[in-house]
């Protein structure tokens, strides 16, 4: 759910629901950070478990203000398995706080590199312009 309220003082207040939590933020900005990685069929379950049990909790433990959530997508593709992660941030500043000034460089820990057959060296970033939930 995404609700935007425009007040008479020109301030936009956005109420964003992610899972069962509501977040209130000022302004319209929200940024999605998208990254792709591929494994062999044999390493796919190993990599998924690594993401869920080590990498995602380590990202959350950084307590980056404005980091809201992460999504994991997976699909078999031409004899390998593609993974996509989408991270959600309140602002570009939050993205840079997570990834540093060279924020487009992908965050791929050494253990992940051991099981990935290939991966994007850079993440793609998109400003969220509309979100409709039903």
Image (spheres, rainbow, N blue to C red):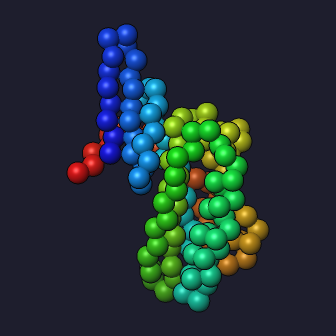
Image location (x, y in percent) of residue 62? 70, 49
Front residue of this view, candidates 61 and 84: 61
Residue 59, located in which quarter of the rendered image? Answer: bottom right
Determine whether 9 is above or below 6 in the image: above
Asked if residue 1 is positioned above or below residue 73 in the image, the reply reads above
Q: Is residue 117 visible?
A: no
* Residue that lies at the very extreme toward the bottom in this rendered image: 42
* Residue at image coords 52%, 70%: 83
Picture quadrant where residue 114 is located: bottom right
> Going 37% across and 13% down the picture, which residue do you hit?
10
Look at the picture and state if 50 lies above or below 101: below
Residue 18 place in picture, x, y as percent = 42, 50
Location of residue 126 in the rendering, given as x and y in whole percent from the top left corner = 47, 43
Q: Residue furthest right?
A: 110
Query: In the rendered image of this protein, does residue 126 appear above or below residue 85?
Result: above
The single residue placed furthest to the left in the displayed view is 134
Q: Would residue 84 be visible to someone looking at this image?
A: yes
- Is residue 61 left or right of 37 when viewed as pictured? right
Q: Quadrant of the N terminus?
A: top left
Residue at 64 percent across and 71 percent down: it is 53
74 to the left or right of 60 = left
Count of numbered badges drawn on the protein: 0
Q: What is the x, y in percent for residue 8? A: 32, 11
């Amino acid at each position: 759910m995404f609700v935007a309220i425009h007040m008479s003082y020109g301030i936009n207040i956005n109420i964003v629901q992610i899972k069962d939590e509501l977040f209130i933020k000022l302004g319209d900005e929200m940024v999605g950070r998208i990254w792709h990685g591929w494994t062999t069929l044999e390493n796919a379950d190993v990599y998924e478990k690594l993401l869920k049990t080590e990498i995602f909790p380590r990202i959350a433990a950084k307590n980056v203000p404005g980091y809201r959530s992460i999504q994991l997508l997976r699909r078999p593709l031409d004899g390998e398995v593609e993974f996509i992660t989408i991270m959600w941030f309140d602002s570009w500043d939050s993205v840079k706080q997570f990834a540093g000034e060279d924020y487009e460089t992908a965050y791929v820990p050494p253990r992940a590199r051991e099981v990935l057959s290939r991966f994007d060296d850079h993440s793609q970033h998109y400003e969220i312009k509309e979100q409709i939930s039903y």
